[in-house]
Image (cartoon, rainbow, N blue to C red):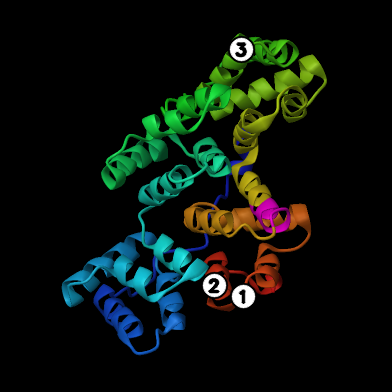
């Protein structure tokens, strides 16, 4: 009974009714060009419009002031508040591309960002993100991932970034076979087995993997996540687990990522900002539900406790907490 966790997936940000981009652009111009930047006005407008509307506002702003809205936001704002406001202005594929680029450029690589984005995006999202990456940075996403990572971790990312996962296809007989291969891969741990493992996890449809994981449990008496955690380590292991968690319940995966970003990493701002913005029109409402169910406290409550100032206001506006979350 696959789809039950996917039925009512929903976001927190919707198109604003009675939308007037020219009026919004004018208000933003006033807020940004005044002596003291009106941050509340920025939050009220940009978090209460959907992404498509924000792009229309940016166009109106450009024709009205001859200036780039993202440029003005970058100039006027600072720190994490700036990251939120600027992040809201990118179309989703460009935002993913932006996050991946910053995860790889400069010293060191933010592997967790690569894992989170590439393990969770659909074929279509990956295709658009590659195009956006190429346009924005005149670089090839595959080549950059190849040069910034290594080993089986790299092989798995390279497979995911192809965006060639089967869709909607199931074959119960094949599921038992795949489960055997996964089980063997957890026993043997050779390079060849690692390759087989990632090939199955990166290329089979979500529906098929759902069956494979059930078969795996039957064969081994063990949950696939526990098996992977026991047999492998490092970023390879983290990536495989992320794929499994996304297959099972994507909003729950993001709830888990948010929880660990807030509690295990002392509020890892980049991760919190990225998930709230990237999922705001997809499944953030569902992520909030999963968060509350799993961790007892609401996401709203935890953001309120850990963030401050206009940064906190902006995150809470995107999170769009209900009365019971306060």
- What mark, if any, has residue 308 been given in the picture? 1
Residue closer to the observer: 71 or 252? 71
Q: Residue 191 has which mark? A: 3
The residue at 39%/45% (across/down) is 97
- Hey, which quadrant is residue 206 in on the image? top right
Provide the secondary structure element on which disc 1 rests. loop
Residue 290 in sight from this viewpoint: no
Q: CA distance from mark 1 to mark 2?
A: 6 Å
Residue 200 falls within the magenta-colored stretch: no
**Contact, mark 1 vs mark 2 (Cβ under 8 Å):** yes
- Structural crowding at the residue carrying mark 2, measured as other residues with C-alpha within 10 Å and reported as few (<14), some (14–19) or many (≥20): many
Q: Earlier in the sequence, mark 1 or mark 3?
A: 3
Which residue, given by chain and number where applicable, does mark 2 sit on? Answer: 311
Q: Earlier in the sequence, mark 3 or mark 2?
A: 3
Q: Where does the magenta region start and end?
A: 258-265
Q: In the image, what residue occupies the spot 57% across and 15% down?
A: 195
């Amino acid at each position: 009974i696959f789809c039950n966790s996917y039925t009512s997936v929903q976001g927190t940000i919707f198109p604003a009714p009675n939308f007037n981009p020219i009026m919004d652009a004018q208000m933003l111009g006033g807020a940004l060009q005044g002596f003291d930047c009106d941050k509340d006005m920025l939050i009220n407008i940009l978090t209460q419009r959907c992404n498509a509307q924000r792009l229309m506002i940016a166009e109106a702003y450009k024709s009205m002031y001859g200036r780039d809205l993202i440029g003005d936001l970058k100039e006027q704002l600072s720190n994490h508040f700036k990251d939120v406001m600027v992040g809201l202005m990118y179309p989703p594929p460009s935002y993913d591309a932006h996050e991946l680029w910053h995860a790889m450029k400069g010293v060191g690589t933010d592997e967790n960002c690569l894992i989170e984005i590439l393990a969770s995006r659909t074929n279509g999202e990956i295709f658009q993100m590659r195009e956006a990456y190429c346009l924005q940075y005149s670089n090839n996403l595959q080549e950059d991932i190849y040069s910034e990572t290594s080993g089986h971790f790299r092989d798995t990312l390279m497979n995911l970034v192809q965006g060639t996962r089967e869709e909607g296809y199931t074959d119960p007989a094949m599921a038992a076979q795949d489960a055997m291969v996964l089980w063997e891969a957890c026993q043997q741990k050779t390079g060849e087995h690692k390759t087989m493992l990632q090939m199955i996890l990166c290329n089979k449809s979500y529906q098929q993997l759902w069956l494979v994981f059930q078969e795996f449990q039957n064969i081994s008496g063990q949950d696939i996540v526990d098996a992977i955690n026991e047999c492998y380590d490092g970023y390879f292991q983290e990536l495989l687990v992320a794929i499994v968690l996304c297959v099972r319940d994507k909003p729950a995966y993001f709830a888990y990522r948010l929880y660990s970003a807030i509690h295990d990493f002392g509020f890892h701002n980049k991760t919190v900002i990225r998930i709230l913005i990237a999922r705001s029109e997809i499944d953030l409402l569902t992520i909030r539900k999963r968060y509350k169910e799993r961790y007892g406290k609401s996401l709203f409550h935890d953001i309120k406790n850990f963030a401050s100032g206009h940064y906190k206001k902006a995150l809470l506006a995107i999170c769009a907490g209900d009365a019971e979350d306060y």
